[in-house]
Image: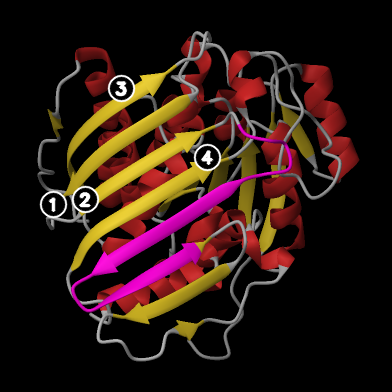
Amino acid sequence: MQGSISPKVRCGVIGAGWWGTYAHIPALLEHPDARLVAIQTCGHEEALKVAKDFGVPRAYSSYEEMLAEEQLDAVVVSSSPNLHFEQARAALLKGLHVLVEKPMTFTAAQARELVSLAAQSGRQLLISAPWHYTRHGQQARKLIAAGQLGEVRLINILMTNPVAHLIRGVGAEPTHAHEEPYLKPRPGTYSDPQVAGAGQIYTQGSHAAAYLTFLTGSRPSQVFARFHNDGSSLDIYDALNIQMENGCLVSLASTGATSINRRDFEVRIYGAGGMLFLELWQGSMKFVPLDGTAASDFPALSADEIYPDRAPARNLIDCANNPEVNLSPGTLGLAAMEVIEAACLSARSGENITIRPLQGTSK
């Protein structure tokens, strides 16, 4: 109702580690409609310290205890990837709105279950992907949906970010924090396959894979992949060929082995009527019509707009009050997991992998 005051959303954070304390907790504390009442992290003393330092009323070392004792409306799950599914599932079964860090789960089947649970319970499920919230991302999505590019035939993506040291387990320094983090990643979070799932494909490929469905509204249908571990136990270099359900062809190359001073997220979209060129880490976007008329440069993003790391948690609060403003729904995390799972299977088998159609789940 116009003019009404939304009640504060009572929320908690499960997995208040590096990214939870860097992005999600500050976002919830600064949101006028949020009330952060509890955090959870491994270790009782660490949980108490995090709660005290951030001014959060209650601390838990067990997420089960937090969910049982607190009257919550929403939670952020920002624990290690191996815990995402069980913790998000428990929160959804409690009737809570849930934001899950990427990668959403370990398997596509787990992701499908979370999406189904959210739909059945009428709760909002979000995947944490800051690039879905940029001005350019929203504009690109609208241009494609409006047919400004015509039928999208080809997408080329190059994504690099200097995270190879994390995947190799030889360091714990974050790579794109704007300021010194409160905590650093725990050992094994990125390098232990039992905790991380895989290497670059889970760590960074999850961003790029979700972005494909975010932009086009189409799901992946086939994936052929090759990985190179470069002496590591997990993949460092990934090359994927993907076909989307709408027939669009995708070439996706990604690596964590790049200069500490260099990162790329180049997205080239070729349609029957025009081309769209985005440089996500540079904050630039250009539309080039195929008919030879003048290209259009979109206003560049400011440094603060390029990677809006607090936007996912803010959106969790907003869509708890208004479901229509969910800008990064769990279905995008599911689409990413379908690409990731198929890519891992393809890299192991050497075969092209067909992804089964969804049944009973909207895009």
Inspect the magenta stretch and tell me whether residue 136 lies in it.
no
For label 3, the crowd category at 10 Å Cα-Cα, with few meaning under 14, some 14 to 19 and many 20 or more, is many
Q: Residue at x 27, y 82 (%)?
A: 148
Q: Are marks 1 and 2 in contact (CB under 8 Å)?
A: yes
Residue marked by disc 1: 245
Going 62% across and 76% down the picture, which residue do you hit?
Answer: 300
Which kind of residue does numbered mark 1 sit on? Answer: Glu
**Is 340 situated left or right of 102 in this image?**
left
Q: CA distance from mark 1 to mark 2?
A: 6 Å
Query: Are the residues tagged 3 and 2 within 8 Å (C-beta)?
Result: no
Magenta-drawn segment: 258-278
Q: Which structural element holds mark 3?
A: helix
Position in image of residue 68 (x %, y %): 55, 31
Tell me the crowding category of disc 4: few under 14, some 14 to 19, or many 20 or more residues within 10 angstroms, Cα based. Answer: many
Residue assigned mark 4: 101
What is the secondary structure assignment of the residue under circle 4?
loop
Closer mark to the observer between disc 4 and disc 2: 2
Q: What's the residue type where badge 3 is placed? A: Cys
In percent of width and height, residue 226 lies at 31, 24
Residue, x 48% and y 11% (percent of image)? 194
